[in-house]
Image (cartoon, grey):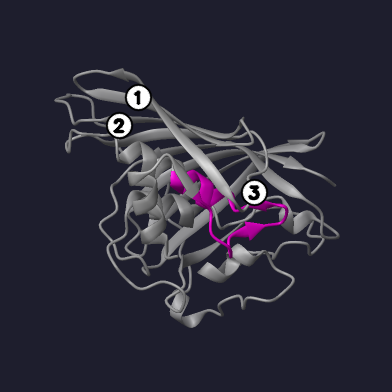
Amino acid sequence: MSLLQLFEDVKQNEWIDIPAGWLQGRTVFGGLVAGLLMQKACSHIQDSNKRLLSCSVTFVGPVQQRSARLTIEILREGKSVTTLETRLWQDGAVQTILVASFGAPRVSSIKVKQEPIAPTYVQPENLSVIPFAKHMPECFQHFEVCWAEGNYPVTASEHPDFGGWSRFSPEQHENRQLTLPDLIVLMDIWPPGVLPMFKQVAPASSLTWHITYVNSVQHQLCDWFKYKVVTEHAAEGYSTEYAYLWDQSDHLIAILRQTVTVFT
C-alpha cells in the first residue's frame, strides 16, 4: 500500500490497517503515526483559508503493525482558529495523541522576522546517501538521508547534534505533490540529537514532539529538505532538543521541539 493510499484510507475510515515496512524497533515509525493523525485532522478542516499553525504529539505507547482506530474531536472552532485532537487506539488504549491548531490569516500590524540563518551545506547531490542496511530500522528504506554536519549516531562523540538533507526515496515512492501529512512523516526520520554520543546501540524514543509550521509547503514529494538539530539539555535519561527544517532554497518551513527518552 502506498502512502497516498494509506492517507486516503484514513480519510474514509475510522479503522485502518498499518502496512508492513514501517517498523522502527518494536514500534511503528513515529513519523508515520503522526502523519496518519495529521491526515485525520486535515480531513476535518472545512475552511480552506485555515492552515496548520502548530501541533503537539505525545507518543503514549508503542504502536503495533496491525489494525488501529483513529478518532477525532473538534475542541473549538472559532472564526480564525480551529483546534482538534486526534487519537490512535489499539487494544482499547490510546497510544498516540495529536493536538493541532489551524488558523486563517488575520490583519495585524505586528511583523517580526528573526528567523535562524540556514546553515550552508554541500548540496545533497554531492553528498553520499546513507545506504539502507538490514540492521537499520525498516522505516529507513522509505527515505534518503545525507549527513552534512556533525557525527553519525553511535560514534561515541563528545558532542551531540548534526544536520543534513532528507527526502522520500524516489525508488520507493512515486513523485507527486507533497502534502502536510507527508511532511510530518519526513521530518521525523532524523534521530535524536544525542545519538552521536552513544557508545553502543541503545533505545531512544520521542516522548513529545511540538511543531510550529512557519511556511506552507509547495513542493514535490521527492524534493530535498535541509535539517539541523540542537540539544539544549540531557540528563537522567531524558533530552530536550530543537530543530529547524528548510527547503532547498533556504525558506524556513518548520520549527521543531522534542523531548526524548534515552536508555543509556
**Amino acid at dot 3:** Gln
Q: Which of disc 3 and disc 2 is earlier in sequence?
A: 3
- The residue lying at 41 percent from left, 30 percent from top is 72
**Contact between labelled residues 2 and 1, with CB atoms less than 8 Å apart:** yes
Q: Which of disc 2 and disc 1 is earlier in sequence?
A: 1
Q: Which residue is mark 2?
A: 102
Q: Is residue 34 depicted above or below 106 in this figure?
A: below
**Amino acid at dot 2:** Phe
Residue 99 is inside the magenta segment: no
**Amino acid at dot 1:** Thr
Q: Is residue 240 depicted above or below 5 in this figure?
A: above
Query: Which secondary structure, mark 3?
Result: loop
Location of residue 145 (image quadrant): bottom right
* Number of the front mark, 2 or 3: 3
Q: Which of disc 3 and disc 1 is earlier in sequence?
A: 3
Instruction: Please tell me which residue lies in front, 158 or 178.
Output: 178
How crowded is the residue under tag 3: few (<14 C-alpha within 10 Å), some, or many (20+)?
some
- The residue lying at 77 percent from left, 43 percent from top is 262
x, y percentage for residue 187? 48, 53
Q: Measure the C-alpha gap from mark 1 to mark 3.
A: 27 Å
Tell me where the magenta segment starts and ends, as one range.
17-36
Q: Which residue is mark 3?
A: 64
Query: Which secondary structure, mark 1?
Result: strand
Q: Which mark is residue 83?
A: 1
- The residue lying at 72 percent from left, 56 percent from top is 25
x, y percentage for residue 11? 33, 45
Instruction: Please tell me which residue lies in front, 151 or 2.
Output: 2
x, y percentage for residue 153? 72, 62
x, y percentage for residue 52? 32, 37
